[in-house]
Image (cartoon, grey):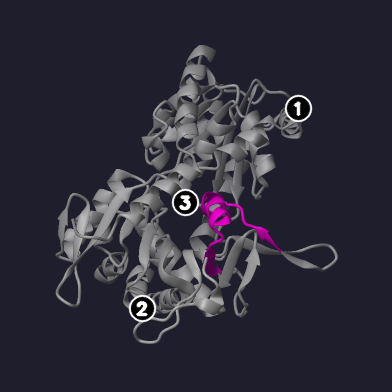
Amino acid sequence: MADSAQNSRDAAGRQYGEYDLIVVSNRLPVDHTVDEDGQGEWRRSPGGLVTALAPVMAKTEGAWVGWPGVPDEEMDPFDHDNMHLVPVALSADDVELYYEGFSNATLWPLYHDVIASPEFHRAWWECYKTVNRRFAEATAEIAAEGATVWVQDYQLQLVPKLLREARPDLRIGFFNHIPFPPLEIFAQLPWRRQVIDGLLGADLLGFQRPSDTSNFLRCVRRFSGFNVRQQQVQVETNDGGVRLCRAGAFPISIDVERISELAHRPDVIARSEQIRQELGNPETVVLGVDRLDYTKGIGHRIKAYGELLEDGKLAVENSVLIQVASPSRERVESYRLLREEIEGAVGRINGTFDTLENTAIRYLHHSYPVEEMVALYLTADVMLVTALRDGMNLVAKEYVASRKAADGALVLSEFAGAADQLKQAILVNPHDIDGLKEAILRAVNMPRPEANRRMRAMRRQILQNDVEHWSRAFLRALEHAGTRD
């Protein structure tokens, strides 16, 4: 990292910033909390993106640009956990239009196979453009000459082009954490060409699955007209030249060392044993852990589990389903309706099958610290990941990483990116309720030798491809991207 007093200037006399590696995401990797004494402090945020990138940033002493999570508040840059954090201010209107509107009511459902209907509003799009420009300007201001900038996710798809225009010296990467939709679905977006152009400002575009990469390149051919050869787009520049933008699959992973360490900690193991005792020591504990989102297939798994109880294939005396559903986007109407639907289904099943001693489904609408989550993973004999569409799903990988005894069974949706890597899981189409029921029973009744064999194979895959492997692979590819052959 260069010293700010020695920043260089370009030919136009513009002063460069001081950071050689910058991550740009919708949110900063910290949350502001207030303790019992009214003292405020910043704490590292939970979640897959922060877990994935915080170790990289800590080693490089890089900068992170993002919204601090508090609307209508201007904040100065500050340092936290070996990272320089640069807050981007959003007004309450910005949050409503750019984040809750265009990002999560237009792009999110569109990119998740239109499981819910996307809404297209011009005012949302105009705000999305404005906020993306604000992020790009904040990044351009702090980037050193020739710096590497890694832009994250669907909220900021216009930033690569805006950065390219403001700072052509930068090396720009973009990673899409959610699926990229097929051409026939993406075509619905009124601003499809602008989004494609925004993404093509990057030197390297990363996606979770090869199929996402293929979807994107099909959209490039259709809506930009640029030549595509061997996953490289020949982007025509304003001066008549050609710049290469490469697209490829870089499946994200987890901090395996952290999860494994927690799985071996005596207090976490004791907590796992306590959880099982509090459940009445059932023969089988089945677990689901998700954000409360319509893409996660929570309703499908609850329906399947309820039918297994009704069929007499499972009984509350010896089996329990724990469903953790972390609060998510509760101001968005579709999410409020989803919560009512899920809680209603849980209530009906529990009302039908509960006894004084046993509960069919333990539904927990809370977020939990990672220590509690690992304790739950250790408790669970069967893990259900039944997403209807998911970029990766790190919960599946965390469960595998926590199973230090190489036991347990994972039921995994074929529509989650993790299915490409965890092929020894019981793969399932979550839309097929009968097939999902069969998969749950197969997991519950799986012989121990088969469970051990499957889990050992999945653990090898996770251990060899942790989050550092992911970040190194992407950054190494970014170093060589963007030049002509």
Q: Position of residue 218 (x, y in %)?
A: 20, 55
Of callouts 1 and 2, which one flags the residue occurring earlier in the amino acid sequence?
A: 2
Q: Which residue is mark 1?
A: 277
SS of the residue at dot 3? helix
Note whether 29 is above or below 393 in the view shown: below
Say what amino acid the circle numbered 2 marks. Ala
Depth check: give the residue in front, 408 or 24.
24
Q: Is residue 455 magenta?
A: no
Say what amino acid the circle numbered 1 marks. Gln
Note whether 56 is above or below 242 in the view shown: above
Q: Is residue 66 magenta?
A: yes
Stretch in magenta: 42-67
SS of the residue at dot 1? helix
Q: Which residue is mark 3?
A: 294
Q: Position of residue 296 (x, y in %)?
A: 47, 46
Residue sticking out furthest to the front: 6
- Labelled disc at residue 424: none
SS of the residue at dot 2? helix
Note whether 411 is above or below 112 in the view shown: above
Q: Which residue is mark 2?
A: 166
Q: Residue at x 60, y 80 (%)?
A: 72
Q: Position of residue 284 (x, y in %)?
A: 62, 23
Mark nearer the viewer, 1 or 3: 1
